[in-house]
């Protein structure tokens, strides 16, 4: 089965994808070498001036990047732990199994920005239910206007929104595991804990790695939640790379410099995700 | 020991369920409030804590001229863009996935896996990186603020998902099916269309649902690439948030917009429990 037919199947998709993407990527690189801004909207050539500025004179970009790393790694770890726990609990016998499975899936079906609008009212510092209930115990945290708690609020919302995705991938994995190793463990009289450590977890390692990588990729784009919830504030306390690039590029119209940041950000993403994937594979699969 | 375990298990599951449901209940309650019951103090239960009003729901269908929030048109725009982009992505993605699953490609150091990875890796691209050049690209083509422009962008977002799910799915459909069809005198296209596709319906449904989810929940591209002519639902609702916020109509419109996809949760669960998702999502 090795004829020209294979190209008839492959090429339409490949050509469309490359066709739509080639211009944006080439253009970003070219734009990053220009001084395009609102006063001077043209593709002049200023060499690597923008890159020098980014690497020597823009701590705000790097702070935003480390903040993004912190937020995405924290949320993904939480999602993995909670998602795995939930998946294990509704994996086999539990009352109302299918009811719980549906409930656990629902948040990922909802539009993040729209739910964030609701969460904003939920965490409203004087009119929201959270502070109303906590107020009975004498604490009313400033969920949105304190730099430290604003990060926690973003994390809570991200965990609510995306734990279901982790749950879905892990439960699908659990359901596809072969039965024999579990039977063998049962015959050996292994406790539930030992079964998990020696059977379930090793079998789930490849699926876990896949799920974590997929979630890290998606989490590294955190933008919608921040945009609606805090607009990067208070100050720059929740500003992530995407949001900073958005401000520079599409609010201040420093297109050239924004393209420089975009391109750098993309390269860093690709490199760090590759490294993370390698490290995770080493850590979780020991053989 | 066993009882303690059961107790912990059910407590955890119940707690998480409450956490999941809380914002929906809050939104539902808020959607029946009026100015007084939102701003005076925090209220929860209608009739007990406050007198319910239907104002929040009524403005959804009123025209903007009469002080309403017209979400009907954005609603249909969202449905149209999501469905069209998902359909195109599924068609192109399925064909490509079939090629990658059944044939061997070799060009220099590029192999099948590299091509598959190329497709899937497009998800790594942060939206902001694409949005600036797309902004300029679409305005050059005159497609800024139009439905076709958005659909074009959404295809890039969704095709990787279709390829990702379908490659794995086709890999599990036995090759013998196509081979038998070919021996029986079908040409490769007929074999694909008449034999392989009908056997891949669960995979297509799963891929379709994922495309619809990720198309429906996108906000950023719709926000950057459209202004007044075309508005999608999320943009419209977030715009409500910026003015003096009427929490009641905000909650009502939020509930209306998330409702259709909640049905998807039931479909996904069905396929999950039947075991059809297990391979498709690895």
Image (spheres, coloured by chain):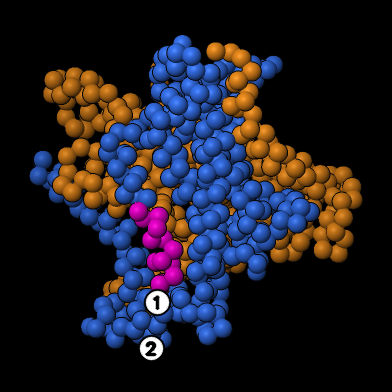
Check the rendered structure and report the hue given to chain B: blue
Q: Nearer the viewer, residue A116 or A24?
A: A24
Q: Position of residue A147 (x, y in %)?
A: 52, 65
- For disc 1, the marked residue is B57
Q: Position of residue B268 (x, y in %)?
A: 35, 44
Instruction: Residue at 49% x, 45% y: name it.
Output: B211
Dividing the picture into quadrants, the one containing residue B236 is: bottom right
Dividing the picture into quadrants, the one containing residue A3 is: top right
Check the rendered structure and report the hue given to chain A: orange
Helix, strand or loop under label 1: helix
A160 displayed left or right of A254: left
Q: Nearer the viewer, residue A152 or A227?
A: A227
Indicate yes or no whether the magenta region holds residue B254: yes
Q: Which residues are magenta?
A: B251-263
- Residue B248 lies, with reference to residue A260, above or below; the image says below
Callout 1: chain? B
Q: Which of labels 1 and 2 is toward the front?
A: 1
User: Tag 2 or tag 1, which sits nearer the N-term?
Assistant: 2
Callout 2: chain? B
- For disc 2, the marked residue is B36
**Is residue A143 visible in the rendered structure shown here?**
no
Q: Position of residue A53 (x, y in %)?
A: 79, 51
A278 displayed left or right of B38: right
Indicate yes or no whether the magenta region holds residue B190: no
Q: Nearer the viewer, residue B126 or A153?
A: B126
- Locate the N terminus of chain B and report the quarter of the image it occupies: top left
Q: Residues within 10 Å of mark 1 (few under 14, many from 20)?
A: many
What separation in Å lies between label 1 and label 2 (alpha carbons)?
A: 17 Å
**Is residue A94 visible in the rendered structure shown here?**
yes
Helix, strand or loop under label 2: helix
A177 displayed left or right of A32: left
């Amino acid at each position: 089965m090795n004829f020209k037919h294979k190209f008839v199947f492959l090429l339409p998709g490949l050509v469309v994808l490359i066709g739509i993407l080639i211009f944006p990527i080439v253009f970003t690189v070219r734009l990053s070498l220009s001084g395009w801004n609102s006063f001077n909207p043209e593709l002049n050539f200023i060499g690597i001036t923008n890159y020098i500025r980014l690497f020597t004179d823009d701590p705000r970009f790097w702070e935003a990047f480390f903040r993004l790393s912190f937020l995405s790694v924290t949320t993904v770890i939480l999602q993995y732990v909670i998602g795995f726990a939930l998946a294990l609990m509704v994996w086999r016998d539990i009352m109302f199994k299918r009811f719980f499975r549906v409930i656990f899936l629902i948040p990922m079906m909802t539009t993040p920005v729209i739910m964030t609008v609701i969460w904003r009212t939920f965490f409203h510092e004087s009119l929201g239910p959270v502070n109303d209930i906590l107020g009975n115990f004498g604490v009313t945290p400033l969920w949105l206007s304190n730099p430290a708690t604003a990060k926690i609020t973003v994390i809570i919302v991200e965990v609510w929104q995306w734990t279901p995705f982790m749950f879905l991938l892990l439960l699908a994995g659990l359901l596809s595991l072969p039965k024999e190793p579990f039977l063998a463990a049962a015959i050996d009289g292994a406790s539930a804990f030992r079964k998990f450590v020696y059977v379930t977890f090793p079998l789930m390692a490849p699926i876990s790695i896949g799920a974590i990588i997929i979630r890290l990729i998606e989490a590294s784009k955190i933008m919608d939640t921040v945009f609606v919830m805090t607009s990067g504030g208070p100050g720059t306390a929740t500003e992530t790379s995407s949001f900073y690039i958005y401000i520079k590029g599409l609010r201040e119209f420093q297109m050239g410099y924004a393209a420089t940041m975009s391109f750098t950000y993309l390269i860093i993403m690709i490199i760090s995700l590759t490294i993370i994937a390698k490290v995770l594979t080493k850590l979780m699969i020991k053989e | 020991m066993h009882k303690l375990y059961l107790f912990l298990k059910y407590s955890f599951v119940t707690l998480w369920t409450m956490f999941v449901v809380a914002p929906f209940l809050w939104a539902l309650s808020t959607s029946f409030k009026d100015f007084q019951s939102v701003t005076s103090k925090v209220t929860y239960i209608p009739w007990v804590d406050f007198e319910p009003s239907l104002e929040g729901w009524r403005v959804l269908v009123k025209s903007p001229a009469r002080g309403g929030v017209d979400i009907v048109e954005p609603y249909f725009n969202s449905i149209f863009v999501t469905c069209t982009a998902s359909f195109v992505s599924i068609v192109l993605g399925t064909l490509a996935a079939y090629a990658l699953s059944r044939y061997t490609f070799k060009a220099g150091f590029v192999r099948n896996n590299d091509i598959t990875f190329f497709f899937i890796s497009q998800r790594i691209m942060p939206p902001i990186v694409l949005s600036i050049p797309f902004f300029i690209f679409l305005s050059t083509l005159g497609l800024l603020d139009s439905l076709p422009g958005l659909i074009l962008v959404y295809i890039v977002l969704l095709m990787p998902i279709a390829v990702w799910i379908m490659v794995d799915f086709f890999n599990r459909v036995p090759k013998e099916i196509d081979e038998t069809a070919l021996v029986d005198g079908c040409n490769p296209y007929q074999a694909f269309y008449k034999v392989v596709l009908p056997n891949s319906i669960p995979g297509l449904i799963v891929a379709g649902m994922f495309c619809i989810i990720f198309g429906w929940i996108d906000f950023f591209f719709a926000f950057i690439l459209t202004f007044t002519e075309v508005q999608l639902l999320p943009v419209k609702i977030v715009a409500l948030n910026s003015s003096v916020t009427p929490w009641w109509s905000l909650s009502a419109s939020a509930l209306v917009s998330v409702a259709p996809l909640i049905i998807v949760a039931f479909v996904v669960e069905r396929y999950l429990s039947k075991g059809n998702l297990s391979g498709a999502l690895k």
